[in-house]
Image (cartoon, rainbow, N blue to C red):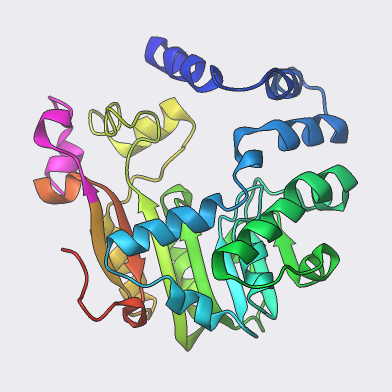
Amino acid sequence: MVPRLATRLQAVRNLSWPVLLARTLRHVGVRSGWLDRLDFLNAPDATRPRKAVDILFGAMRSAGLDPQRIVERLPAATVLEIGCGRYIGFAPLSAVAGAKLYIGADPGLKPELFQNRAVLDRIVDPAIAAAAALIERGPVDRADMLAKCRLERCGVAEALRPDDAVDVCVSVSCLEHIGDLEASIRRVAAASRPGTVHAHLVNFSNHLSKSAPFAHLYETDPSSFARDWGGIVNGFRHPDMAEMIRSAGLDLRFVPLDRVAPDHMPAEIHSYWTERYEDDVLAVRTGLFFSESLILDQGVKS
């Protein structure tokens, strides 16, 4: 309990008092749309309207991939963002670039917040402006953007409908959180067209500490880690995900982006991990699954 308490205390240090108030009241059972808005409007991500896009595009560039090729596919496209987060990361960019439909799926999403005037003024409009500046296009009307959004408060397997056909599919630090990942990947594959562009950034760490990214996780087995830390990650490593993707019929490549040095790995690693994976697999903290059409002429980093 001591490491868990210390980690949670560290996580709240940078939160503003409105967010702390809202989350404290919710923790003791108070439920209110006003509290949801208070948290939403004052949380750290409220000031980063392009966070998801910047993270994914930055990771793509570092891997030798071209984000512009995603932008070029957006006009008239159906875009699926797996784990879009509370702030519907790629929705503004999709709308500004002329997408036909944006599907955002996330169990933590609250679509009703996007009917609030303060949210529209302080969150949606700046996000549209930031997206327009990124690709040097004119902004779109927020009502038009939201009219082209299908926001689903659920996992991706539940969000997709039988007739959905996706042209662009992205995710940022999401696949590692999905419990039944294999079923979700199969559903995404079924909704993908032959030329669908995929880009998925995965964080294989414990999600607790950047300085000790595998502490607690590699020192036990995944089920014990999930029990102790609320199931924050599913424990799959990139070969597991690659096999699920291949078996589902998707042709995606993987490139590791960040490997942890040996002296930053736990001193003792549970046999669950050492019996299943090589050291170089266990050392991968972040990586990308992507479509080959995103590769620049000079190739992909190894």
Residue at the image position 65 percent from the left and 55 percent from the top:
88
Above/below status of 225 relative to 6: below
Q: Residue furthest bottom?
A: 194
Front-lying residue, 158 or 95: 95
Above/below status of 39 relative to 203: above
Quarter of the image containing the C terminus?
bottom left
Q: Residue 219: give x, y in percent of width and height.
A: 23, 28
Q: Residue 148: give x, y in percent of width and height.
A: 76, 72
Front-lying residue, 152 or 198: 198
Say whether residue 267 is magenta.
yes
**Which region of the structure is painted magenta?**
258-276
Is residue 183 visible in the rendered image? The answer is: yes
Q: Residue 45: give x, y in percent of width and height.
A: 60, 40
Q: How many marks?
A: 0
Is residue 158 visible in the rendered image? The answer is: no
Lateral position of residue 233 relative to residue 239, left or right: right
Residue 267 falls in which quadrant of the image?
A: top left
Q: Residue furthest top?
A: 2
Residue at the image position 35 percent from the left and 82 percent from the top:
293
Front-lying residue, 237 or 151: 151
Q: Residue 140: give x, y in percent of width and height.
A: 76, 69
Say whether residue 44 is magenta.
no
Lateral position of residue 136 relative to residue 274, left or right: right
Residue at the image position 66 percent from the left and 40 percent from the top:
46
Above/below status of 220 relative to 110: above
Residue 162 falls in which quadrant of the image?
A: bottom right
Quarter of the image containing the N terminus?
top left
